[in-house]
Image: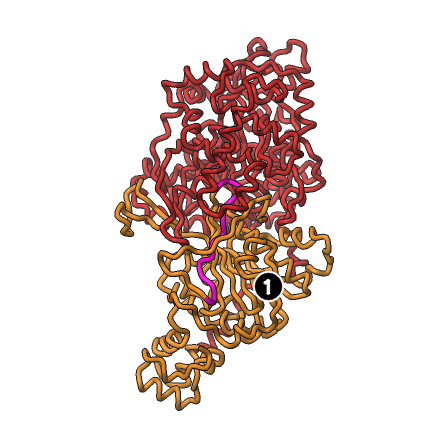
Chain colours: A red, B orange
Amino acid sequence: MEALVDAVSKELAPRPRPLREVAHIGEEKFTTGDSHLDDVLGGGIRTGMLWEISGENNAGKTQLALQLALTVQLPQRLGGLSGAACYITTREELPTSRAQEMIAKHPLLSPQLCGLPDIFTVRAPFYVALQKVLTESVPAFADGRANTPGAKPAKLLIIDTFTDIFDHLKDERYEDTTLRARDLRGVSLILHRLASKYRLAVVILGGARDTFPRIDGEDRAPGELRYSDQSRWFARAHTLPGEDSREAVLGHVWPNQLNARIMMSRTIRTRPRSVVDPRVQERQGGRDPKRRRIEGEQQFSSTPAPDEAIPFRRFSVIFSSVGPPAFCDYVILDEGVIGIPPEEQPPSTFLYPTQPSTTSLSSVPTTQGLSSAPRSTASSSNSTQTPRYTQSLSYASESVSRAPSMPPPSQLVVTQSSVTTTATDSQAPLSAPSTYDASVPTRPPSTVPLSQSVVPSSQPDLDEDWDMYWKGTEGDDQLYANAGGQADNPEEAAETGPPVEAQETDSDYYWKDGNDDDALYTDL
Amino acid sequence: MSDRPLSTLSSLAPPVLSALAGAGYETVQDLLSNSTPEQLSKDLNIPLPASQAVFSAAAGPSQRSLPMTQSAAAMMGTTAKQYSTACPPLDRLLGGGLKRGFILEINGPPGSGKEQMAATAVRTFVECDQQVLFVDMQNMVLPATIKRILMNSPTADPDGMDLVRYLAFHTTAEFVAFVRSLPAYLEANPSTALLVLNSLAFPFQPHTIKRFAMLDKLKQVLARACASMGLTVIITSQLTTKMLEGNGQPGSAPPGSKSVMIPSFRDSDFPPGRTYRVIIVPLTRTTGVIRLLSSPTHVPSRGQPAREEPYQRIRGMIS
């Protein structure tokens, strides 16, 4: 009997292939439509993997997902895969008129190259529906495309917004965490199999909620790690003060399933439109829509507002199996999601030359509340709202300020091998502010705008910044090397554009009052 | 341990012992390297669970604070050569590197880089002209990544790629079929020196009753391959979250109570005497420690601090 099972296994078992034969698997990727975002991702969105893009409401996740569903259709010479997309929605319908606007206005997209017919969309508001869609509708679509000559093959699967389905406030069955864990594992298996079988990029969108400091103490045993400690590193981003006040909603079971996790955050930084929007710069007093509206309403243009303050947002890779953690900024314009090189100095683990590393420390004092005038007004006006900004100072500032302080504690890391290293690390940047005064004139203007005021950055200054940050990467294999420690730069050159609020007044509510809408999720 | 007579295994019933003696099995080594539970049950005409019990007893208890005796084969090692894992802190924990015939299991939270470590270790074996079988079960390391790692080294040999075979699957059924066909594959490819089982916990996620049988079978196959052909194995596993009530009891806790992340597998799931188990513990965004959970010669008992080595991430893992 055993021999029979062995024989059957031998036949059914998947056969190993020589690496040379399959080495192309994993190379396939498509552009997001923006070169800076692509660089952060390690070349673009790769197929055959499960990506999660998390972020609070109105951070721009749907915007980016829509953009991906269009850029995947582009031909290879423009960075696409000539592929089709499946877009599964859980709440609303696909925003088709926004898609049309992007096709019309985005520099890479055009009606001849991409369009709605190659986006297969379906609604799946709850788990059973999602399971059915993933096991029946998506394979049917993908098979159909594969078997039809001349049709674009399915290359992208988007689920917007995945975490809604497992939200225990929307579906009370999921108050049972065991059930939720089981269903999440089930979906994960289906998604990974789809990704492998059809060589799809699976991109799921997830929500983010406020984090709350939890101090649980030391690890109980060598092999037991405190979840609340560890989740800081895989559920939150730490590239910007305040960024880690948000964490991805699904934890415990779900982060283990992902190959990569990205966080899109709204921040309190702003830029004037005149600096950021290329069209305003080119045009002489041309017309420009001041505010985007949701689909179904007419877009109206108003008189241009070159000094309108546009929110700057942050795009961070928290972890990825195909690239190191990286980040950039982005704005949302009519044409879509546009990336911008980060204004803050990246942490010095990216092996920048020494000069930037000193300025990296300088970004820390501004978060510590020094005497510069904009800072104090910001903190006083925010004091009633427990903004995430000051929240991060109290709890997460350790982790944040540790990052730029790599040069001094390098000796500390070697000599200490216990948890006390973290405490010592945090002392280093805290002492750093005392050596800087508020003016810090040598810093690039990028670190100034921690207030709501408009930043009168001039174009030449930004150019200078970009030259400093930019290091030519010769290929995406440089973006994620092995442990050889090559100097790399996943950051990208800039092209700024003023962020335009892509949703309606909802975003104003969040912007001003902090988001109380997001309920207290459980840890799972 | 290898020369220990079977008659000294006190947990076996006398009829079983006499059947073993009658069939010619005298020492533990005889039993472990020449048979499997199924084969033994056939030979001795005893039910399968009984023969599995024989094997478990022969394998020895796994949790001990005394140094464990190693099997003679493990002590000999096919060669004394140590293969670097390309991660200096890990090499230090291993006492210089990974030797042929040993198993290394790397645990870690999401994003800690354990899969990348396993993929980078492949390079050492390829540079020593050894064949590798890389099995990926969660799309963490795609073939292009391995190729990039191999081609990026300064001593890259374009033919190095030919030494690596790649296999990907996700389901429990495929895993079972793989494990059963592995001995035949190894027989057909005897120069395979390294087997990587990446994201081993993924096919085990659907909690089925077969889990123990599957793990037991894997353990037998690995033990035999390590002993007979000096196969080296690198395994990566995710952590599982265990909810604790306030007083430390496990249970389905209400939200907000403490939870810990623990390795998905137990010490007893791997062949004793040849397994190193480590866990990556991130302490900051870019630094942390790698802790040794168990090694062939030592299992730290409760209360004893484990050996750790600090690491620093520069786009990967470096000391």
- Is B124 in front, or is A337? B124
Q: How many marks?
A: 1
The answer to whether residue A128 of the structure is visible from this angle is no
- Is A4 in front, or is A511? A511
- Magenta span has A90? no
Residue stretch in magenta: B284-297
Residue B62 placement, left or right of B286: left
- Is B177 in front, or is A482? A482
Q: Quadrant of the N terminus of chain B?
A: bottom left
Query: In the rendered image, which residue does mark 1 sit on?
Result: B133
Q: In the rendered view, tell whether residue B266 sits above or below residue A165.
A: below
The residue shown at (48%, 24%) is: A368
Q: Is disc 1 surrounded by few (<14), some (14 to 19) or many (20+) residues within 10 Å?
A: many
Q: Position of residue A23 (x, y in %)?
A: 65, 54
Q: Amino acid at mark 1?
A: Leu
Residue A466 placement, left or right of A10: right
The residue shown at (31%, 86%) is: B14
